[in-house]
Image: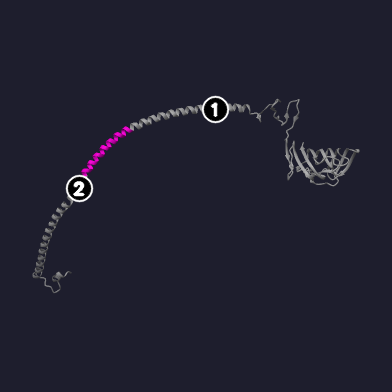
Amino acid sequence: MPSQFEKYRFTKKTVLSDETFNKIFKDIDLRITALEDIKKDWTGAVEAVTRYGLQRVEEVLRPSWEHINNKKTEADNLVAQIQQKRDNADAIINTSRDDVLQQIQTEKIQALNNIQASRADAITAIQNAKTSALTEIQTAAQNADTVDGYHASLSPAPQVIVPLDADGVLDLSATYVRSSVYTFRRVDLTNATSDYMLQVGEEAYISFSNTTSVPLRIATQSGTYYECHLICSNTGGTSGGTAAPIYLNPNNTTYSNSFVYAALHRTSGGASSDYTTYSAFRCGWSFVSSVFYITNFVQYKNVKGIYDLFGVIVGYPTMVVFSTDWRDTTTPWTSLGTIRFPQLSSGYIIVRRLV
């Protein structure tokens, strides 16, 4: 408890009497009176300060209020000027808008005119293209049956192609030759490394130079038939060659004494004949110009033809008509084989498949 109230503290010995309480009340009254005096002094001071403060506030703020009023007046004037400029701008905008609208209308009309002109040009171009396309179609229709510029027709005529009939046969009329469909093409097998199966009508060309062995590289099968031209380009004469046979080794090998050779020949010494056995087809002698035909069936295999030989004393020319049969009815002939010469030879070979 504050010290100023110590004298008001009661104990068990304090006598509760009027005198005791009167002292207390008196002291309280004195203190209240003192507080009221202090209040009066403070109230007066506050009022004085308030009056002084309001006066100072007015003195301080009056210049600001005047400045603010001046600025407000300036702002009002500026607003009025802006309003005037806005009115002027609206007038200018209205005028410009009319000009712009007029320009837009003009450009719109021009654009429409351009579109109409472009449309007319496009229609004209389409019509021209249509006419050109129709002309091309008509021309193409007229030439639809042409090959390399030649028309096709069932009636043979100059500069006309006759098509095959329903049976795949070229029928040139009753007075013309009827021909089955063949492949007419030459293949160069000079440097071939594997056997090639000729198609019917197709021919192989093989050149050779200064060699004793020429593999034909032609695949074959039972039921085929060939024409062969064997031409040596060595110098003609009665010397330079070896008096020995030229062979066709079927399947690129030999078959001991399985071939029987029959021939009629005319030399410078007269006419004679041969009938003997070999281990391959004999198709020439020394140097030759030979034409022979090859028949290949498993059950019958033959080479027959005619050749002229040269390069030996009895030759130049010597004509030989011959036939060689391979007397074997079970061995398949699958590779046409290799031509074997008795001396170094040069020339070319043509083999054409007929069947």
Q: Which residue is mark 2?
A: 67
Amino acid identity at mark 1: Lys
Q: Main secondary structure of the magenta part?
A: helix
Q: Nearer the viewer, mark 1 or mark 2?
A: 2
Q: In this view of the protein, can residue 283 be seen by the observer?
A: no
Q: Which residues are magenta?
A: 72-96
Q: Which residue is mark 1?
A: 130
Asked if residue 63 is positioned above or below residue 8 in the image, the reply reads above
Asked if residue 354 is positioned above or below residue 132 in the image, the reply reads below
- Badge 2, how many Cα within 10 Å: few under 14, some, many 20+? few
Percent across and percent down for residue 105 are 38, 30
Q: In this view of the protein, can residue 90 be seen by the observer?
A: yes
Amino acid identity at mark 2: His
Q: Which quadrant of the structure image shows residue 165?
A: top right
Residue at image coords 20%, 45%: 70
- Do the residues bearing badges 1 and 2 touch, measured as CB atoms within 8 Å? no
